[in-house]
């Protein structure tokens, strides 16, 4: 029986992964995150239909933003993430707290502000083309989409 | 700051989760799996747009099946999963091996056969309405869809 793993750390990984859309192979999420420089720099590891799986490591607070057209999923792989929410149906000061092995779906249109007091590793799932800073003022924290790792 | 966690184990959990589509709250994946009786019994924990997140524990071999219309994602939370693949682009005997913290996307139309030699806990992601046994003969292993936990 032949098997595949995707633990390459050389620069060829990006090209190979993009060509197959990351499909049909094992993807080691922590291994992929280990290849990323800096926080709040999501990188695509695979696609499912028109959705993308992105890994990211985060630390500190991100900006308030929202995605009017789509829900967004956060899965914590390591560390702890707080996602403050504001909008219809959420009391002032409402927040979701996630630790490793926990996930949350932020509903479309709901403003949210992720933050982490320790370095935290995440898997994000959202449609292809979603901008990390949402629909508003992009500011200086917008990351170019479709950067594969 | 108010926080939400979703660690209820009483029967009200199902109703509350379905009403919100599991959104806007922390979902503890291992905790949810702990509520499931039996193997190969996926249960929905949240929706993102028209996709569902399903948790399942598995042991032994499942049937060969395929989903002609959609890719399907497997994320291993605990244990180890082998997914044999057959179809265009895959050599005979090809298989993906996944351990905890690893994921794979099975491309649409590709026959696959998951198996686990130890009890393994998974998160599945696929469009709402996908049948666990795929497009072929449902056999006795088809599970009713939209069972929330």
Image (spheres, coloured by chain):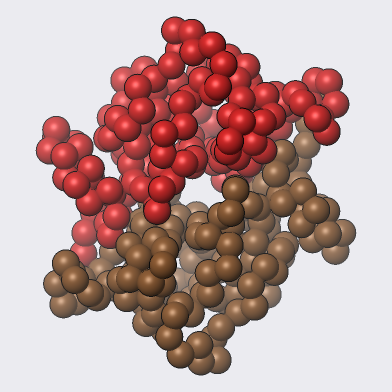
Chain colours: A brown, B red
- Asked which quadrant contains residue B74, the reply is top right
Q: Position of residue A83 (x, y in %)?
A: 34, 69
In the displayed structure, B119 sits above or below B11; it is above
Q: Outermost residue toward the front?
A: B69
Task: Describe residue A133's horizontal placement relative to residue A8 as left or right.
Answer: left
Task: Describe residue B2's horizontal placement relative to residue A55 as left or right.
Answer: left
- The quarter of the image holding the N terminus of chain A is top right
Q: Position of residue B135 (x, y in %)?
A: 55, 22
User: Quick one: B60 or B22, which is closer to the camera?
Assistant: B22
- Asked which quadrant contains residue A68, the reply is bottom left
In the displayed structure, B144 sits above or below B124; it is above
Q: Position of residue B112 (x, y in %)?
A: 65, 24
- Asked which quadrant contains residue A65, the reply is bottom left
For the point 41% across and 67% down, the residue is A69
Task: Describe residue A38's horizontal placement relative to residue A1 as left or right.
Answer: left
Q: Position of residue B144 (x, y in %)?
A: 35, 22
Residue B127 appears in the picture as rendered: yes
User: Quick one: B131 or A2, which is closer to the camera?
Assistant: B131
For the point 33% across and 41% down, the residue is B45
Residue B58 appears in the picture as rendered: no
């Amino acid at each position: 029986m032949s098997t595949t793993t995707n633990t390459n750390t050389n620069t060829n990984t990006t090209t190979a992964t993009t060509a197959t859309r990351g499909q049909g192979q094992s993807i080691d999420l922590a291994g992929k995150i280990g290849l990323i420089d800096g926080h709040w720099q999501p990188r695509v590891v695979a696609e499912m239909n028109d959705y993308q799986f992105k890994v990211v490591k985060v630390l500190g607070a991100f900006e308030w933003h929202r995605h009017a057209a789509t829900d967004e999923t956060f899965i914590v792989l390591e560390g702890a993430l707080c996602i403050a929410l504001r909008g219809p149906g959420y009391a002032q000061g409402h927040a979701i707290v996630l630790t490793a092995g926990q996930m949350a779906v932020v509903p479309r249109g709901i403003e949210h502000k992720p933050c982490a007091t320790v370095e935290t590793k995440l898997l994000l799932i959202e449609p292809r083309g979603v901008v990390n800073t949402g629909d508003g003022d992009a500011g200086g924290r917008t990351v170019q989409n479709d950067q594969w790792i």
